[in-house]
């Protein structure tokens, strides 16, 4: 049975979160707006303000809820996590306040699934406590997210691995205590067995951050937090591999499904906030003798935004439900894969359309930095590249559906009306007799 209701006990948690994010997390956005400030462990003033808020979240039992019960978490499931992330998405500081900031969430899942007891104690414990941040270092400058052209390698030398090569867009590397690095360990093997995953502490000699690249929406072009890194003969102990040799793909995939759903629902949350701004502006401003909201083109922008956002929200929640059904054993493993891809593809366009329309309704104020809309809109394209380029997901989705299609048996399509009519009359030759 399909049921869109939320049980009262959990709704109470969502209501508390909504008030807390609006009153406290959005205030953090205003007090500490600097680029990447929420990840900087040395920003003393921000940390002083942050810690009491994190403690309050922990008292509510809402800290780091992304881990399932088999990994030591509360086990809310993806639908509930989606509803929580919808609220968290309103604020750039909220993910850190609630212990659910990317890439730390996915990295925590990897460590919980594949880490040894020693690795969990050294890296996962402080990460889950919010004392450190981490980095996922995968894409490369010569090939982006295409693993077929990765060249960064890890070579076994005695009881150590030696990493050599470059990585691109390793987010938060300059703040991280450790990096999770995918490197080629067996270049001659099939693609899915070619790479392995490693834990690399950032104080290891040979890690060179060449640049910290800023992106659209960032306010400081010289102080981005997407690192271009060179691993220059970086030596790490043999036991710093996560999972099996050649199992880097398997390890990496463990972090993507739920993470994409959380990312999508945070996008819904930010778009809800943009829609609120749109509605407020429409009933606050007059032009040509009428309120903005009385002009049909403004009404069209509002209506289109409401419909598009609701469609996307329902897609994401259905996908989250499918993941929960897999976890419960009621669906086959891999069943949500196509829907996860749909969420990824739709996310950037929905974000751009809703935020863009809100910006337009605000006019010159919208494109100024007096409102958050211009910064949000400037950063929307990053959603098209995070977790893999959108084009790759579109192609994958189309191929999956094309495999289900069958060619027409005759000269004309199977829905060709004259052909179907002839077949119908052959079955019922007297159907049209008077």
Image (cartoon, helix red, strand yellow):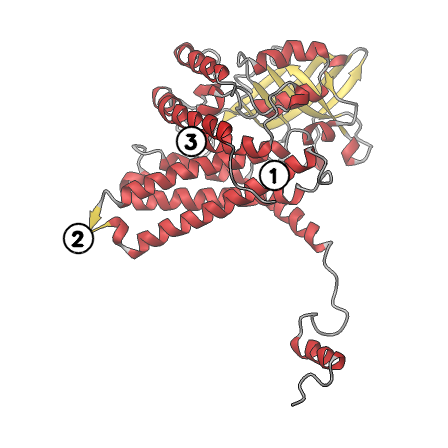
Q: What element carries label 2?
A: loop
- Answer whether labels 3 and 2 touch (C-beta < 8 Å): no
Disc 2: which residue: 289
Residue density around tag 1, few if under 14, some if 14–19, many if 20 or more, within 10 Å: some
In percent of the image, x 30 and y 36: which residue is there? 368
Judge the density around disc 3: few (<14), some (14-19), many (≥20) Cα neighbours within 10 Å.
many
Q: In which quarter of the image is residue 168?
A: top right
Viewer-side label of 3, 1: 1
Q: Nearer the viewer, residue 166 or 111?
A: 111
Q: Distance between the residues labelled 1 and 2?
A: 48 Å
Is residue 427 in view? yes
Nearer-N-terminus badge (3/1): 3
Whole-Å distance between the Cαs marked 3 and 1?
A: 22 Å
What residue would you read off at disc 3? 90
Nearest the camera: 5 or 425? 5
Q: In the displayed structure, would residue 265 be above or below residue 206? A: below
Q: Looking at the image, is 310 positioned above or below residue 328? A: below
Residue drawn 71% across the image and 13% down it: 235
- Residue 278 pos. (x, y %): 33, 43
First reached walking from the N terminus: tag 3 or tag 2: 3
Task: In this rendered view, identify the residue nearer to me: 324 or 98.
Answer: 324
Place of residue 217 in the rendered image (x, y in percent of width and height, measured from the top left): 42, 33
- 151, above or below 31, in the image: below
| Mark 1 or mark 2, whichever is nearer to me | 1
Question: Which residue matches tag 1?
Answer: 321
Residue at image point 79% right, 10% down: 159
Are there few (<14), some (14-19), or many (20+) residues within 10 Å of tag 2?
A: few
Residue 229, x across and y down, in percent? 59, 23
The quarter of the picture where the C terminus appears is: bottom right
Q: Where is the N terminus found, in terms of image quarters? A: top right
Q: Measure the C-alpha gap from mark 3 to mark 2.
A: 34 Å
Residue 64 to residue 356: above or below:
above
């Amino acid at each position: 049975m399909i049921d869109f209701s939320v049980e009262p006990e959990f709704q109470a948690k969502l209501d508390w979160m909504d008030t807390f994010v609006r009153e406290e997390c959005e205030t953090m956005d205003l007090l500490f707006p600097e680029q990447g400030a929420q990840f900087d462990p040395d920003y003393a003033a921000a940390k002083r303000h942050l810690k009491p808020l994190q403690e309050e979240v922990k008292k509510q039992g809402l800290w780091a809820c992304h881990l399932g019960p088999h990994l030591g978490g509360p086990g809310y499931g993806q639908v509930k996590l989606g509803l929580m992330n919808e609220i968290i998405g309103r604020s750039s500081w909220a993910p850190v306040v609630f212990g659910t900031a990317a890439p730390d969430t996915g990295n925590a899942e990897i460590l919980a699934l594949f880490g040894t007891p020693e690795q969990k104690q050294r890296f996962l414990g402080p990460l889950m406590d919010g004392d450190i941040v981490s980095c996922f270092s995968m894409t490369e400058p010569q090939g982006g997210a295409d693993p077929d052209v990765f060249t960064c390698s890890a070579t076994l030398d005695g009881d150590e691995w030696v990493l050599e090569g470059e990585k691109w867009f390793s987010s938060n590397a300059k703040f991280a205590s450790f990096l999770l690095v995918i490197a080629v360990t067996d270049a001659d093997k099939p693609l899915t067995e070619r790479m392995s995953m490693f834990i690399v502490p950032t104080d290891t000699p040979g890690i060179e951050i060449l640049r910290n690249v800023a992106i659209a929406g960032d306010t400081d072009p010289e102080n981005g937090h997407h690192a271009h890194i060179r691993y220059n003969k970086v030596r790490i102990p043999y036991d710093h591999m996560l999972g099996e040799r050649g199992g880097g793909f398997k390890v990496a995939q463990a972090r993507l499904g739920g993470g994409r759903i959380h990312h999508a629902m945070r996008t819904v949350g930010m778009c809800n906030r943009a829609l609120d701004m749109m509605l407020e502006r429409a009933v606050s401003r007059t032009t040509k003798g009428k309120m903005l909201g009385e002009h049909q083109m403004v009404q069209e922008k509002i209506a289109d935004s409401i419909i598009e956002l609701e469609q996307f929200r329902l897609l994401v929640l259905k996908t989250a439900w499918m993941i929960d059904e897999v976890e419960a054993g009621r669906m086959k493993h891999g069943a949500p894969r196509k829907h996860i891809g749909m969420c990824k593809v739709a996310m950037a366009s929905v974000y751009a359309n809703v935020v863009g329309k809100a910006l337009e309704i605000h006019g010159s104020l919208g494109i100024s930095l007096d409102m958050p809309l211009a910064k949000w809109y400037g950063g929307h394209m990053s959603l098209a590249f995070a977790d893999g380029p959108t084009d790759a997901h579109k192609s994958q989705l189309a191929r999956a559906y094309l495999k289900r299609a069958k060619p027409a048996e005759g000269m004309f399509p199977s829905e060709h009306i004259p052909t179907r009519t002839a077949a119908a009359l052959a079955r019922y030759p007297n159907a049209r007799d008077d």
